[in-house]
Structures are given as structure tokens and as C-alpha cells.
Image (spheres, coloured by chain):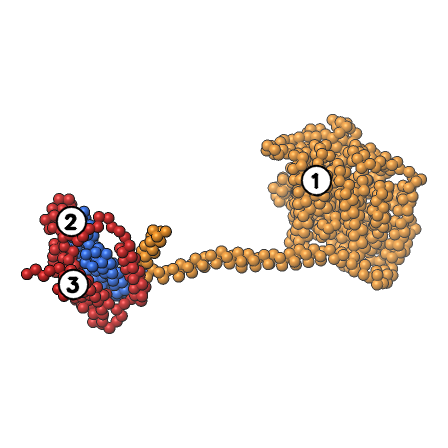
Amino acid sequence: MNFLIPLIPALPLAGFVITGLLGRSMGRDSHRLAVWAVVASWVVAMVVVAGALTHNLGFGEGGFGVTLWNWIPATGFQADMGFYVDTLTACLLIVVTTIGMLVHVYSIGYMAHDDGKWRFFSYLNLFMFSMLILVLADNLLLVFAGWELVGLSSYLLIGFWYPRRSAAEAAKKAFLVNRVGDMGFALGIMAIWTQLGTLNLQKVFAAFAGVPHEWQIAIALLIFCGAVGKSAQFPLHVWLPDAMEGPTPVSALIHAATMVNAGVYLVARCNPIFGAAPEVMTVVAAIGIFTAILAASIAFTQTDIKRVLAYSTLSQLGYMFASLGVGAWTAAIFHLMSHGFFKGLLFLGSGSVIHAVDGEQDMRKMGGLAKKIPTTYVTMLIGSVAIAGVPPLAGFFSKDEILGGAFKNGFLWVWAIGFAVAGMTAFYMFRLMGMTFWGESRVDPETEHHIHESPPSMTRPLILLAIPAVFLGMLIGLPPESGLLHQWLAPIFEHTIAASGRTEAAYTFFGIDGALAIVTTGLVAAAIVLAWRLFGVNMPALGLRAEPRPDRVRELSAQPAMAALYRGSSNKWWFDDLNNLLFVVWGGRLAAAAFWFDRTVIDGTVNGIGVVTTGAGTALRRVQTGRVQNYALGIALGLIAMAIGYILIAVR
Amino acid sequence: MPIGDSIPLVGIRWDDVLFVVLAGTLLVSALLVVTMRDIIRCGLSLTVSFASLAGIYALLGNPLIAATQVLVYIGAISVLILFAIMLTQTKNAPARLVFQTQAWFAAAAAMVIGNVIAVTALTSTWPNLGDRVATGTADVAHLLFHDYVLPFEIVSVLLTAAVVGAVYLARRDSGRREEDRS
Amino acid sequence: MSNSLDSYLVLSGLLFAIGTFGFLARRNAISMLMSIELMINAVNLTILAFGAFITPLRTHAAVIALIVIAVAAAEATVGLAIIIAIYRNKKTPLVDEYDAMKD
């Protein structure tokens, strides 16, 4: 195990280096090495995960730590290059490596005709390496290193088609907004260091209770700040929708499976820190659930298929943070895993749709694609049902655990908003399905002839992802709150849960839990039916058919209250404009003022010193007349002054 | 027939009268030297002031120095100055300004200097102050050739050097005029 | 009056002041030199006055005065030679034209 664990990130690193250096000369085969590296990494990761979850292969009851070398041996500051694997790490490893591998395979087909394919695969490998470092690290400095590397990789990947201006700007936006969060995270790390003198995670958790309470709150807030940036919570959510400029596999990898989960992982990993500061947990829950409803409301009116999925990701991430905030830790990780699978499935499926209609991403120009691209259609339908939370698919179990946890831990407002968001999620997902796959075809006539199913390298990952989307919930989530996942993760969270004074009550199907589940499912069903009635449905197998009614949609959205909401929603609630105003316009003015100040006052002062000196010199030049008599007068006057001085002194 | 110490009827001492006359001549001629427009007249006025100085030296009981003053200053230096004036005459010299622009400052500075010296002189007490006593030439000679013989020799070397230098500097050599104007 | 040291000292002070004025104010170079001679003579007068009134200094003052006269003669000689040389170059005896060292 000492050898296997470092091998997991080492393989993608080697893939990145070799593909980056030699990729251009590899031509059409430039993807092979990268894909094989990630597949090999997945195999090793599965071995490690198996060991970790079943406590075999060298894993004891706790985690397994591997220290490679002493990275920073300064006196007073030590940091190791070390990895730590326990059950939480194992859960993340499952998500990261599996979806990463499937995205790599998918990209073989998706990027087959792109000249920069070698760059793409080397960046993908770099991304895998960074994310694995982040997940496996055993000290905060290494986590931060992985954190920043992930940000860099996402910049490279989002801006992959850099000649396109919007892509380059989106990459910059992602990086800069992330940076804001990273600054908070760095300050948190520094605070931990000043208070505890160590950055090793396990040591920090053991000693955290001894930190003064104000510092505990500060540290927790700062670490949450980093998570807000990386996982695109309000107010740092603005980068995620624009990041859709990257190729679809990138969106799947970054926004479904890995990078945005880094924030959730960080908070979950640091649960002792957050458990010690209940005020911060309330903040986490508030921001999370607010992001959820904000994003869901924007998804109602988006017309780009990838944007809908991006806002949906934001919304689900909000769910996860709300779950962390109310103290339902395991539910958050459960939702993280199931969301990774079905969101990855949805993104890759949308990539397949876009591939089929020759690059068109606007849903208003799609429609009636169900019969033409059947595999994609079926898998996307499965993904939509999963995300809507229809039992017995994965989404139902995880979402219900979150809502149940919120209700039982006393956060009724979180429950209420989450309940509404569940309905909204179902509605906009089936709006997406309706506009894309059902109804009449609004596709451009010339591309309509070319609509074809994607190659197997793209459809096989879809099918492979659909399987966990259906079965994962039942596998690890049943029975609720005492299933496999809870058994795995209990040792990690039990101290925090015990310290918060709450006990995870047993699940009572005929009590409150069952009631909540039934009510939520009812709302979801109602939302789906409403979506069918407005946007159409056509599932002959289930005997469901309805025509889309665009005029009814228009009529509804024209009513005054709805019209205002519609406008706000389609403008993303003007957050981008607010940021633009604050930072670009006012910031630009401030910068212009500073520039003016620098140029006029400071440079003026410096130049003025020069001018004054030159002027003084020119003026004083006139003393040098070159005539002896003038100099002699000077001598005489000096002599007089000295004589008078002497006389005065003598008189005194 | 001895004259006596003071003027018979008025009672003013001859020494004082002599002093006042000589001092007045000296100051007036000195003022004329520095203020007259025609420079040759300045030179002549300088000669007059040298002469009155010689008289004052004699009054101070130093006939040797008085004689030297007449010989060197009036006999040599004044002649030299007059020669130089004549060599550097320009036709339009009298028509232009006599004084510089800084003449006012110069006057102020001169007055202050004069005041300072006068005040210092009048308010100081000198040690060993006695009455005016004449100096014997034999004593001067003795001192000059015993204790001050080295300065004496050096002064003679200095005079030789001065003469050689003056001859060289003022030499007008037709073949060298281009180089002199470098 | 002629018996007091103060009057001789004041006289020489006045002569020195006049010489200073002439040196600083006249335009002709030879006038400057004449003023210098006046100043030197004022100093000479001072030395001899002290010698006459302070007995230990009597003979020393005379010797010093002699040497001063000799040095003044040498200086006048060389100074006038220089002025003549400059006059040959600049064609003018006026010192405010001698400003080749002007900045």
C-alpha cells in the first residue's frame, strides 16, 4: 500500500509530462498514453479503495498515511509530501477516478478532429493529478498546492479554445474569482499555523479544541471562503456558467465530478473545525441553500443547454453545502457521489447532443431528437429522472437524506427552501428534456440531415455512467441513514456529530422521515407534470404524450409578476452586471484615479525635484560671472559677516 | 633756531598739525585715486598719497622706511603704473562708466570694513603701550642681517623671479603672437 | 593726536576701506591694482604704527615693513605684466570684459 497510494497521482503526472512534451509529435495517437495513464490510475485507485472500505490490505481502523519525503524542513515550519487515505478519501477517489477515466475515454471521440488534441489530453492529465493530490493530501499546504493546481488546470482547460475571445475571458474569470476564495483559504491556513503550529490534518483536528473560540470561528470562515470560491457558491458563483466555454468533457469533469466537489470535500474533511464553530455552520447552510434557490431560479429561463446544466450544478452544490451546514455530513458526501455520476452523465450526454446537431447549443433550435439519437436520449432521460429525485434512482435517496437531516436538526427554513428547490429542479430538467428531445423539430434544416448518433467512444461512457445513476442510491444508501455509506463514513464524522449534541435518529419510515419523503416526491411529481404540460413529452413506452405549448408558456410568462421574475431570471439576477459595475467600472475609475495620482503627483514630484534642481542651478549660475571683482565682493561680504560674528561673540 | 614744540600763539603742537595735514592729504588723494575718471590722474594721485605716507612714516620716527617708501613706491612702482596705464590706453576710456554696477555694494562693504577696523582699534587695549619712539637705523640693519637674513635673501630671489616673470609675460614677440592667442 | 596709537590705526583703517572700495568698484584693471597698493600701504602703516608705540616691536616692525614693500613691488610688477598681456589679448583694460570663465 505504501507503493500503491503514491502511484495514483503519479500516473497522471507522468501522462501530463510526457504528453505535454512529446504530444505534438505523436499526432493522431497523442491521446493513448494519457488515457492509459488514467485507466491505470483508476485500477490502482480501486484497489486502494477496496482496501480502505473493507479495512483490508494494510488499512486499520483509521486511515493509512504515507509520507514520501520531508518537503519543507525549516525549523519551526514543517510540511511533508504525504498522503492520507481513509474512507472519506476512498469515496472521493471513487468519484474522481471513475468519472475522470470515463471523461478521458469520451474525449477520444469528442476531440478526435481537434488539432490541439495533445494539449487537451495533457491538461486533462494535469487536472487529474491536481485533483488527486488535493484529495489524498495529508497536510493543508499540500491541499492548497493541489487546490491552486486545480485552478490552473481549469484555467487551461476552460480557455482551451483560446483563439475565441469569450473562452479566454471565461478562463480568466474562473481563475480570478477562484483566486478571491483562495485568498481566504490561504489566510485560514496561516491562521491555523499561527494557532497550532502544524499543518498536518490529523494533528490539527486533534488539537483544534484548544484554540480560542474567536479563532475557531475565523479559521472556519476562512476555510469556507476557499470552498465558496472553488465550489462556486454565492457570491463567487459567477464563474461557473461562463466556464461552459470549454469543451463539454471539460465541463463534465470540472463541474460535475471533480473540481467543484473540492470545496465540499474540504469542508467535510475539516468537520472538526466546523463542528467547533456552530455559527459558521449556520452561515454555510445559509449560503448553500441560497445558492441553490438562486441558481435554480436562473435555470428556468436559460436557453443554452449547457448553461441549464451549469446552473443545475450550482444548485446541487448548494444542496451539498446546506447539508454540511445543518450537520448531515454523510448525506452531503452521498449527494456528492450521486451528483457526480448523474451530472457527469448529463454533461456528457449534452455533449453528445451538441455533437449530433453540429455544434448548436441553443435549445430553441433543437427538438424532436428523441428518435434520432436514441442512446443519448435514453441515458439523458435516466440522468434527468435521477436529478429530479424520483425514487428509486440515486438522486432521490441523497436528496431526501439532506432534506430529512435539515428538518430533523431544526433548520426548518433550510428544509423549506430545499423543498421548493427540489420542485424547481424537476421542472427545469424536464423543460430541458422537452425542448431538446420531444415535440417538433426546430433544428436548422441543413443540419437536420446530418443528425447522427455519436461514436461508441462517446456513447459507452454514457451507458457506463447511467448504471450508477440508477443503482448507486440503492447500493450504498439503503437502508437510509444506516446503509453502507453511513457505515463507511461514521468514524470520520462521529466526533463532530457527538460534539454538536445531536444524535442521528434512526430512520422511521412511518414517522417523520417517511412523511417528508412522500411530500417531496409529490412535489417533484407535480413539477414534472407541469413541465410536461408546458414543454411536451413523448414516451410511447409509458404511454405519455403531450404537445408542447409554447404560446401557453409565453402567456404565462407575460403576466406582470411572472414577467418581472422572468426578466430577472434571464439576466442572472444582474449579479454579473453588479460585479461589472463594482469591479470593472468603479474599480476602473479607482485605478484611473490612482494612475492620475501616480502620474501627476508622484511623478510630478519626482520630476519636479529635477526641475527645481535644474532651475536652482540655472539661477545660481548667474553668480558665476567670471569676473574677479564680483568674487572679491563676495569675499569682502563674507569677511564682514565673520568679523561681525566675532564681535558679537566677544561682546557677549 | 629750534622751533619749539607747538605753534607760538595758538598752542597746537607741530606734530599734530603735521599729522593732520599729512593724513588729510593721504585720505583725499586716496579718495581721488578711487573715484577719478581719468586714469592718469588716478596714477598721479596715487603718487601723492605715497608721498604723504612717506611723511607719516617719518612722523612715526622711521626715516629709513620713509626713504624706502619714496625710493620704491614713488620711484619705481608709480612709474611702473604710469607706464602700464599708457600701454593700455583706449581712446574711449574716459567716456564710459567709471564704476561697476556693484559699486554701491562695494561702498557699503568698504564702509563696514572701515567701521569694524576703527571700532576694534578704538576699543582695544594694547599691551606694553608707550609713547612714540623713533627707530634707529643701525638697530634695524642689525636685525635685518642677523635674525631676518633668510627672509631677506628670499625676498631678493622673489624680486629676481618677479622681474623674470614680468619680462616673460609682457614680452611682445612677433613670431609668437599666434601661439600666445591660444 | 599724533601721540596716540588710535589715530594712526583709524587712519590706516580708513585707507584700507578706501582701497577696498576702489578694488571692488572700479572697472579698469590698473585701477584695481592701484587700490591694492593702497591697501598694502595701509597695512604697512599699521605695522609701523604698532612698532612706534610698542617698544618690544620697534625694530621688528621696521624689518617687516621693509619686506612688505619689497614684496609689494614684486607683486605690482607681475600684476602689471599680466594686465598688459591680457590687454594685448582682449584689447580692453576693463575687467568686466574678462568673463571667459563665465558659466
Q: Is residue A648 left or right of residue A514?
A: left
Q: How many circles with numbers are drawn on the protein?
A: 3
Label 2 secondary element: helix
The image quadrant of residue A39 is top right
> A154 and C57: which one is in front?
C57
Q: Colour of chain A?
A: orange
- Distance from disc 2 to disc 1, alpha carbons, whole Å, reads 98 Å
| Disc marking residue C59 | 2
Q: Which residue is mark 3?
A: B11
Q: Are marks 2 and 3 on the same chain?
A: no
Q: Amino acid at mark 2?
A: Thr
Please, which residue is most extreme toward the front here?
A: B9
Q: Chain of mark 3?
A: B
**Which quadrant is home to the C terminus of chain C?**
bottom left
- Determine contact: label 3, label 1, CB under 8 Å: no
| Disc marking residue A339 | none
Label 1 secondary element: helix
> B49 and A38: which one is in front?
B49
Residue A378 location (% of width, % of height): 84, 47
Q: Residues within 10 Å of mark 1 (few under 14, many from 20)?
A: some
Q: Colour of chain B?
A: red
- Determine contact: label 2, label 3, CB under 8 Å: no
Q: Is residue A229 left or right of residue A441?
A: left
Q: Which chain is blue?
A: C
Q: Chain of mark 1?
A: A
Q: Which residue is mark 1?
A: A215
Residue C44 location (% of width, % of height): 19, 55
Residue A394 location (% of width, % of height): 84, 42
Q: Amino acid at mark 1?
A: Trp
* Identity of the residue drawn at 77% across and 38% down: A275
